[in-house]
Amino acid sequence: MARTTPKTDWADGELVTAAHSNAIGENLAALLNPPTAVGALPARVETGSTDFIDVHSNFNLSLTTTGGDVLAA
């Protein structure tokens, strides 16, 4: 479920409607189920080295996140 931009222009005495309550519920659901993605490299890379080494000159990885945890395994 996508995040809904919350209402910020409340007026004094304005009542909360069902749509306002639904937007709050949608935002809570979005927090409970954040977007995820899974990617895989085209081949497995293994080494017996205990030091940092270059595994391949074309081996580049770029990650762009929206915040949160990242697991690289």
Image: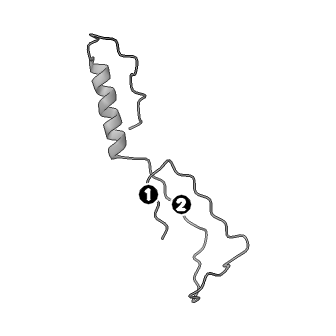
- For the point 68% across and 79% down, which residue is it? 54
Q: What mark, if any, has residue 36 been given in the picture?
A: none
**Residue 32 in the image, given as x and y percentages of width and height:** 32, 45
Q: Label 2 belongs to which residue?
A: 39
8 with respect to 65 (left or right): left
Horizontal and vertical percent position of residue 56: 70, 76
As drawn, 36 above or below 43: above
Tell me what residue is drawn at x 43 percent, y 28 percent: 5
10 Å neighbourhood of mark 1: few (<14), some, or many (≥20)? few
Near-viewer residue (64 or 44): 64
Identified at 46% across, 64% down, the residue is 71
Characterize the local packing of mark 2: few (<14), some (14-19) or many (20 or more) Cα atoms within 10 angstroms: few
Left or right: residue 27 versus residue 56 is left
Distance in Å between CA atoms under marks 1 and 2: 15 Å
Nearest to the observer: residue 10 or residue 72:
10
Badge 1 amino acid:
Asp
Mark 1 residue element: loop
- Quarter of the picture containing the N terminus is top left
Residue 45 % position (x, y): 59, 78
**Quadrant of the rendered structure where residue 21 is?**
top left
For residue 69, the mark is: 1
- Please say if 37 is above or below 21: below
Q: Amino acid at mark 2?
A: Gly
* Image side of residue 44 versus residue 25, left or right: right
Task: Return the disc, 1 or 2, that comes first in the chain's sequence.
Answer: 2
Of the two numbered discs 1 and 2 in the rendering, the one whose residue sits closer to the viewer: 1
| Label 2: which secondary element | loop
